[in-house]
Image (tube, helix red, strand yellow):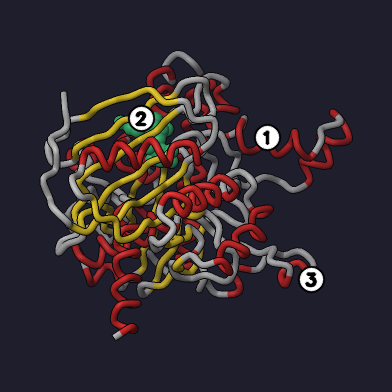
Amino acid sequence: MSLRDFGHHSRDYILTINGGSSSLKCSLFQVGPPLTRVLSCLVDRIGFPEGTLTLTDVADGTSERRTIQAAHHKDCVDPVIVWLEQKVTHMGLVAIGHRVVHGGHRYSRPQRITSDIMDELHRLSHYDPEHLPAEIELIEACGRRYPMLPQVACFDTAFHRDMPLVARLLPIPRRYEAAGVQRYGFHGLSYAYLMEELRRIAPHEAQGRVILAHLGNGASMAAVRGGKDIDTSMGFTPTAGLPMSTRSGDLDPGLLSYLSRTEGMTVEQFHTMVNQQSGLLGLSETSSDLRDLLASESHDPRAAEAVALFCYQAKKWIGSFTAALGGLDTLVFSGGIGENSAVVRARICEGLEFLGLALDEARNTKSAAVISKEGSGVTVRVIPTDEESEIARSVHHLLHQSRSNDV
Ligand code: ADP
């Protein structure tokens, strides 16, 4: 199938770039109103001998695929942009927006990238050596291709920057707080998008007591009251909180010294274990993918236990955040698991009737927009998240603001 040639002449576009561990998602948005996604692009198997680059026309759903050799994320920039330029006549890019996982304690908003911001990102690299260096290289590669084009960094930590101190502090010696060692929280672009959607669909609920559950390969929750984020399950790094596809989530801090004493485990080995070999994969010993585990749980007790532990911990976090919020009005499920798995949603919510939480089985099975029973105390919603749209909106907003300031 072939993509149609967009005949839009001299129109303005925003490109969004969202790098995963071995993948890259890009989307091209035509500047509105409304802001419209026209093309999306996925590069996978970065770092492998051969990856694929898939370009999808959002309007008619047709896709084209090419192979690509990309040792690093930055190697994808030129092939992706060349292809987009072939597809969109007179593609007038006005800005590029990047998802940046860590913004440290300084940034509670998206930032136009300057040399100062780049210095700060380099400084923050050791907070998240798995993501930030590749994100910095992506920004630099885009800067080489379009030296005059504004680029904007949209931080996953920004949504949580105004959490109360009690939720940000780690109970370790004080001097670490000043050195930046505190709870940051992640998945902020997803949470910002979900809150905007909630404000649009149910403005009254958005002002109430809300738990947002982003359950994908990475999984976390955020507690929001009166539109303000008050707590989140991830911490100084995205390894904390709920168990995930390969990350452990919260662990007893004594485990590192125990494994070091008894097995001679090094800090590096521990890091690899808790980030890449734990969670659903570690417990099941077969797969990090929830769909696989649901398919095998009837005959594989390890798969069943992995799914049970995931649901149990998610239930505990809902209980804990309900206490922090002083009650619960709305629970939002999102992410690959939250949006698609009725059975996991049902197991997480089972037994929470005492909070006023009761699912409607038929609605839940259909992954309807509202899956709670009519008249139940807590409205439970499924909202598909869209981090790229959040980036594009933020970039558009920032450009608009700076233009108004120029006048
Ligand atoms: P990422 O965090 O990498 O963006 P996703 O949000 O796409 O990941 O979530 C991936 C997870 O969602 C996987 O565990 C996958 O099994 C799960 N998932 C996707 N679709 C379904 C489904 N229909 N039923 C159960 N789990 C699903």
In the picture of the structure, the residue carrying the numbered disc 1 is 272
User: For the residue labelled by badge 1, is the local secondary structure a helix, a strand or a loop?
Assistant: helix
Q: Residue at x 31, y 30 (%)?
A: 54
Do the residues bearing badges 1 and 2 touch, measured as CB atoms within 8 Å?
A: no
User: For the residue labelled by badge 2, is the local secondary structure a helix, a strand or a loop?
Assistant: strand
Q: Quadrant of residue 338?
A: top left
Q: Nearer the viewer, residue 348 or 112?
A: 112
230 relative to 85 in the view: left or right = right
Please rate how many residues cluster around mark 1, counting C-alpha atoms within 10 Å: few if below 14, some from 14 to 19, many from 20: some
Residue 325 visible in rendering: no
- Amino acid type at mark 2: Leu
In the picture of the structure, the residue carrying the numbered disc 2 is 53
In the picture of the structure, the residue carrying the numbered disc 3 is 175
Q: Nearer the viewer, residue 343 or 265?
A: 265
- Amino acid type at mark 3: Arg
Earlier-in-chain disc, 3 versus 2: 2
